[in-house]
Amino acid sequence: MLLVTMLAAFHPAVASAQGRGWRWFQSCSTPTTMVLEARLDSASAFRTTFPACFLDKAPWNTKVLRFHFTPGRAVEWPNASVWRDGDERRFAATTSAGRTLVAQIYEQGTNTSGSILGIAIGTKDSVTPLDTVLWRGAHNASATDQVLTELVPRLVLLTYPLGWQPQPLARVDTTWCAPPRSNEPLLLDAQFLPARGKSRTGADSEFVNLASFSALGIRRVPRDSIAIIRDEVVCRRIAKEYGTNKPMLIVRVGSFYLADDQGSRDGPSPLWEVAVYDRNWRLLISYGEGQ
């Protein structure tokens, strides 16, 4: 069960001004309403909206959003940290079921595509020292698209403009962007489902291909965070990098991209390869079968 409350806090304004980009809680004639949501085990833990404005220059907005949530299960925090004697010490922590946690979200930076939000999560009570942080990092929000940041497994933060809808997974005939096949294995990969080719034997777990990439931050995401890329410029560029003149099927999985030339995964001689890219289209790793 999730018990949620929200508080808004303000800190003294700072004098420095930041350059051109999207800023939250600023005034402008046509602000974009952004949705900020936290989900634990696919259930909403917190949801709110905030205005975002594209400005040439503005001072930092020092507003901090705080929300409390109480997970109904234990949560593991592999990169908790605490300050001791002037040094930051990292350790693995586990909070028990029913332990109330508090998250703070604040404006950390800006760019021309969206706001950069800082996030810190700690405990609400005094059992853990106040200088202990269970998770700290950043979320790069986009003013035009949904962005998902997984904090720890199954706890995600999402932002998206109000009214945003995921692109449907329907077949679309294009030149460089390949349409999905019947029972498309890359979409099964994206959903962490067994992508078993015809005449293949073995346990289902052997065909859940993304399960071994958790160290890269690739984990299961909600279905609405999976989308087929239909940008012909992107598909053509990736196909050229891939070294093929064939159309590519590219699927976004949260903040990662999977690119597949749709080689056969069927037995007895499967021949296929999928390239994995980060949100900035940097190649991270590839997986597949055959020479």
Image (spheres, rainbow, N blue to C red):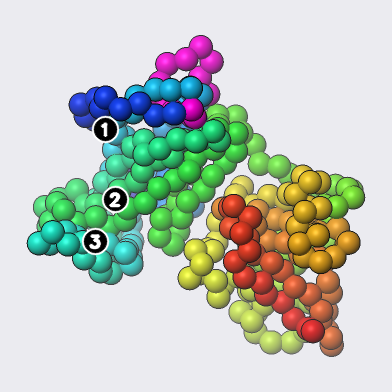
Which residue is drawn at the image coordinates 59% and 66% (left, top)? 284
- Residue that badge 3 annotates: 81
Q: Nearer the viewer, mark 3 or mark 2?
A: 3
User: Left or right: 215 with respect to 3?
Assistant: right
Q: Name the quadrant containing residue 243.
A: bottom right
Looking at the image, do the residues carrying marks 3 and 2 touch, with CB atoms under 8 Å apart? no
Q: How many marks?
A: 3
Residue 94 or 11: which is nearer the viewer?
A: 11
Whether the residues at callouts 3 and 1 have beta carbons within 8 Å, the answer is no
Q: Residues within 10 Å of mark 3 (few under 14, many from 20)?
A: many
Say what secondary structure mark 2 lies in.
strand
Above or below, 100 against 268 in this view is above
Q: Quadrant of the C terminus?
A: bottom right
Which of label 3 and label 1 is nearer to you? 3
Q: Secondary structure at mark 1?
A: strand
Q: Residue furthest top?
A: 29
- Residue 133 is situated, as x and y percent measured from the top left of the image, at 24, 55
Q: Which residue is mark 1?
A: 7
| Front-most of residues 3 and 185 | 185
From the viewer's perspective, is residue 282 above or below residue 115? Answer: below
Q: Which residues fall within the magenta stretch?
A: 20-32
Residue of label 2: 121
**Mark 1 / mark 2, whichever is N-terminal:** 1
Majority secondary structure of magenta residues? loop
Which residue is located at x 79 percent, y 46 percent?
233
Q: Position of residue 228 (x, y in %)?
A: 73, 51
Q: Residue at x 61, y 47 (%)?
A: 224
Considering only order in the chain, which callout, 2 or 3, is on the residue closer to the N terminus?
A: 3
**Residue kind at label 3, given as amino acid type:** Ser
